[in-house]
Image (cartoon, helix red, strand yellow):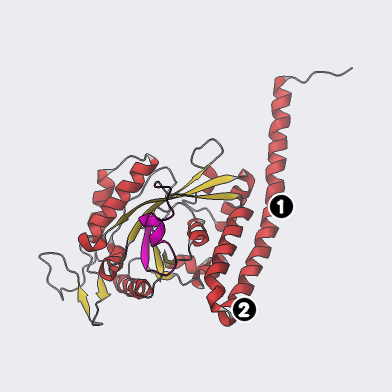
C-alpha cells in the first residue's frame, strides 16, 4: 500500500532535486569552460600570428560559445527592428565607433564581443584576473589605473588611435559594476576621445533576466564576489536571458562629453525603467568637474580641454582623478 506524501515532504524532495540538478550543472559547466579557455589560448597562439584576418570572427565565435556554455542566451534588441538602423550600422565592422553602456557583470565584455569584437576601456585590475585577464589583454583592451590622471590621458590617446583605425571602443561610464537593478553615476572623461575623433557614439543597455523576467540575482558581481564564485552561481542558476539593447546614436560633435554622458544615462534608464536619479548625474559630473582631458589632435599636438576659468597649463588638481 502506497503512503501519500505530505506536502512538506514533497517540498523537501523538490528542493533536494533542484539542489542536485544545480550542482550537476556546475559539474558540467566548469570542465567545458576549462576546455573552451584552452581553445582561446590556441587561438591567441596560432591564429593571431598566422591568420590575423580571422581573429575578429574567431573572437565572435569564442565569445558566443562562452555565453552558451554558461547558460547565457543572448538577444540583440533594436527598437527599429531594422538591420540598417543607425545603431546597427555603427556596430558593423569597418568603421570606428564608441559603444557606451551600463556595466553589470564580467560577462558584459563577452556579450559585446559576440556581436562585434571591441577594444574595452577597463580598470587595470582586470588585467590581473586569472585567465580572463589574459584573454582581455590579448583582445586589445585599454587598461586604466584609477587615481592616476596621466593614465586617463594615455587611455584617451589610445582610444582615439583605435577609433581612427576603425575599431569599436567600448566604455562603461559607471566605472564599476552595478547590481543590475539601477544605474550608478556616469563619468564623462573617456568619452572625449569619441568627440574628438568625430565618430558615432552608440548608446546601448545590457541586462540579465531570469525565467520570470526579473534581474537575474546570479549575475550580481558586486562586493567581494570572485570570478570562480560568480561562475558557480551562474552555472547553478540555469538559463539566463541576456538582452543587449541598441538604444540610440548620439552626435558627439554637437555635444560636450558631459552632455553625452547625461543623455546616455537617461536613455538607458528610460529603456529599462530605472529611476532617473538627478543626484547621481550630478555626482558623476562633480567627480569629472576639474578633469583636463588630453588627447591628440589632427596635428599630433596635445592640448588641455580645460574648463572655463581654468587656463591651460594649470598645475594638476587632486580632483583630476578617475573615480
- Label 2 SS: helix
Q: Residue at x 61, y 73 (%)?
A: 43
Q: How many marks?
A: 2
Give left or right: position of 78 versus 320.
Answer: right
Asked if residue 275 is among those painted magenta in the image, a careful observer would answer no
| Stretch in magenta | 80-100
Residue 321 seen from this side: no
Q: Relative to 43, say whether 105 is above or below.
A: above
Foreground tag (1 vs 2): 2
Q: Marks 1 and 2, Cα distance to the nearest angstrom? A: 30 Å
Give left or right: position of 10 versus 89.
Answer: right
Contact, mark 1 vs mark 2 (Cβ under 8 Å): no
Residue 250: percent from left, percent from top: 29, 56
Asked if residue 97 is among those painted magenta in the image, a careful observer would answer yes
Q: Residues within 10 Å of mark 1 (few under 14, many from 20)?
A: some
**Front in this rendered view, residue 317 or 29:** 29
Q: Quadrant of residue 187?
A: bottom left
Label at residue 27: 1
Q: Residue at x 49, y 69 (%)?
A: 127
- Label 1 SS: helix
Q: Residue at x 28, y 60 (%)?
A: 188
Amino acid at each position: 500500500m502506497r503512503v501519500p506524501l505530505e506536502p512538506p515532504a514533497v517540498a523537501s524532495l523538490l528542493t533536494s532535486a533542484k539542489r542536485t540538478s544545480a550542482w550537476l550543472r556546475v559539474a558540467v559547466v566548469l570542465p567545458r569552460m576549462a576546455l573552451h579557455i584552452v581553445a582561446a589560448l590556441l587561438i591567441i597562439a596560432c591564429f593571431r600570428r598566422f591568420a590575423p584576418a580571422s581573429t575578429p570572427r574567431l573572437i565572435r565565435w569564442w565569445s558566443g560559445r562562452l555565453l552558451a556554455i554558461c547558460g547565457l542566451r543572448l538577444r540583440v534588441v533594436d527598437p527599429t527592428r531594422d538591420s540598417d538602423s543607425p545603431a546597427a550600422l555603427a556596430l558593423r565592422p569597418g568603421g570606428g565607433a564608441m559603444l557606451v553602456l551600463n556595466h553589470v557583470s564580467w560577462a558584459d565584455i563577452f556579450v559585446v564581443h559576440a556581436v562585434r569584437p571591441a577594444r574595452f576601456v577597463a580598470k587595470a585590475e582586470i588585467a590581473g584576473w586569472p585567465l580572463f585577464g589574459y584573454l582581455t589583454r590579448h583582445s586589445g583592451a585599454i587598461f586604466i589605473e584609477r587615481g592616476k590622471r596621466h593614465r586617463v590621458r594615455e587611455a584617451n590617446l589610445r582610444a582615439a588611435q583605435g577609433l581612427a583605425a576603425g575599431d569599436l571602443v567600448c566604455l562603461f561610464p559607471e566605472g564599476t559594476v552595478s547590481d543590475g537593478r539601477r544605474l550608478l553615476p556616469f563619468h564623462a572623461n573617456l568619452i572625449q576621445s569619441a568627440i574628438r575623433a568625430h565618430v558615432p557614439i552608440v548608446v546601448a543597455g545590457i541586462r540579465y533576466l531570469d525565467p520570470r523576467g526579473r534581474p537575474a540575482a546570479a549575475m550580481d558581481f558586486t562586493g567581494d564576489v570572485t570570478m570562480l564564485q560568480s561562475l558557480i552561481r551562474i552555472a547553478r542558476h540555469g538559463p539566463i536571458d541576456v538582452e543587449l539593447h541598441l538604444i540610440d546614436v548620439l552626435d558627439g560633435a554637437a555635444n560636450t562629453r558631459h552632455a553625452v554622458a547625461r543623455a546616455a544615462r537617461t536613455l538607458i534608464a528610460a529603456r529599462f525603467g530605472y529611476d532617473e536619479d538627478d543626484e547621481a548625474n550630478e555626482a558623476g559630473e562633480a567627480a569629472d568637474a576639474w578633469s583636463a582631458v588630453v588627447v591628440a589632435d589632427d596635428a599630433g599636438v596635445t592640448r588641455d580641454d580645460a574648463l572655463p576659468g581654468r587656463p591651460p597649463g594649470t598645475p594638476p588638481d587632486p580632483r583630476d582623478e578617475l573615480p
